[in-house]
């Protein structure tokens, strides 16, 4: 992993739009960006290679979830792209996560999705038939990710303290669902501000629309970065 910059979610449908967005930032400004499913499926590995050519850090957010051998094979290909962080779904189980670690190798950070920050407790219980609290489910997945040798998890800031108490202080907690005060929550349920995430122990935050859909994205990013770094 790298210096804990806010991770910008590049939720754009094309490389053309990514280029237009990134070109607004000074060349010397090194960013940490997230390439998700929409962008990766539209543009493939080329978008990652382009971003890395600019010297930025890349979180490839594909949330892999399949049989162990398939995930292992996929990550053995992904590791050659030079990304800095990749994730899988903890629901795939310990064997799948171990296979993911083996396929990716030891030099790239690997984390697991616990419960999406768009999921409310009632939804989890009704749709997934997990009859515990949301926090208990998240901590359980985090413990399994640690058992499998992963570096951390994707989680809400609300669960960070419990996760670190049940794993270790060095276990990465990457937090989406970040919204500056006064911004629209969108489809996120468990949202916090950058300052709250920092105070509650998150190691990384992911911010998308408050930056990418802002009329002044560089200014919005700098404000979030200042609040996050304290």
Image (spheres, rainbow, N blue to C red):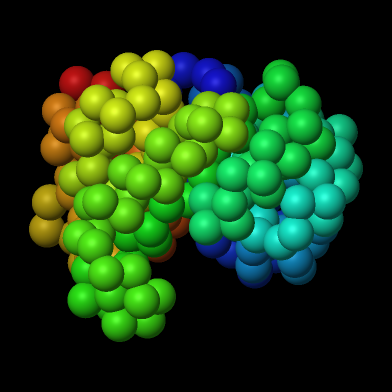
Q: At which x and y percent is residue 139?
A: 32, 43
Residue located 60% across and 56% down the image: 92
Q: Nearer the viewer, residue 12 or 217?
A: 12
Residue located 40% across and 17% down the image: 170
Position of residue 11 relative to residue 106, above or below, is: below
| 175 with respect to 40 (left or right) | left
Residue located 68% across and 48% down the image: 96
Q: Nearer the viewer, residue 97 or 47?
A: 97
| 14 with respect to 57 (left or right) | right
Position of residue 203 relative to residue 160, above or below, is: above
| 59 with respect to 46 (left or right) | left
Q: Nearer the viewer, residue 217 or 200?
A: 200
Q: At which x and y percent is residue 10?
A: 55, 53
Q: At which x and y percent is residue 58?
A: 63, 36
| 21 with respect to 153 (left or right) | right
Q: Is residue 1 visible?
A: yes
Residue located 23% across and 43% down the image: 159
């Amino acid at each position: 992993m790298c210096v804990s910059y806010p991770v910008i979610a590049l939720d754009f449908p094309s490389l053309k739009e990514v280029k237009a967005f990134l070109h607004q930032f000074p060349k010397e400004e090194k960013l940490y960006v997230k390439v998700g499913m929409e962008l990766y499926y539209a543009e493939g590995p080329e978008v990652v290679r382009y971003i890395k050519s600019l010297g930025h850090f890349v979180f490839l957010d594909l949330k892999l979830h399949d049989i162990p051998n398939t995930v292992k094979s996929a990550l053995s290909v992904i590791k050659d792209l030079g990304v800095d962080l990749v994730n899988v779904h903890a629901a795939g189980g310990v064997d799948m996560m171990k296979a993911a670690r083996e396929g990716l190798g030891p030099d790239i950070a690997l984390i697991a999705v616990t419960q999406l920050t768009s999921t409310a407790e009632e939804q989890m219980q009704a749709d997934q038939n997990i009859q515990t609290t949301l926090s208990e489910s998240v901590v359980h997945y985090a413990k399994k990710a640690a058992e499998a040798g992963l570096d951390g998890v994707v989680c809400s800031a609300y669960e960070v303290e419990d996760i670190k108490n049940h794993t270790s202080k060095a276990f990465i907690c990457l937090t989406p669902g970040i919204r500056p005060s006064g911004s629209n929550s969108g489809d996120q349920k468990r949202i916090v501000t950058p300052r709250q995430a920092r105070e509650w122990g998150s190691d990384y935050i992911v911010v998308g629309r408050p930056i990418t859909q802002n009329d002044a994205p560089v200014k919005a990013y700098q404000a979030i970065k200042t609040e996050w770094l304290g």
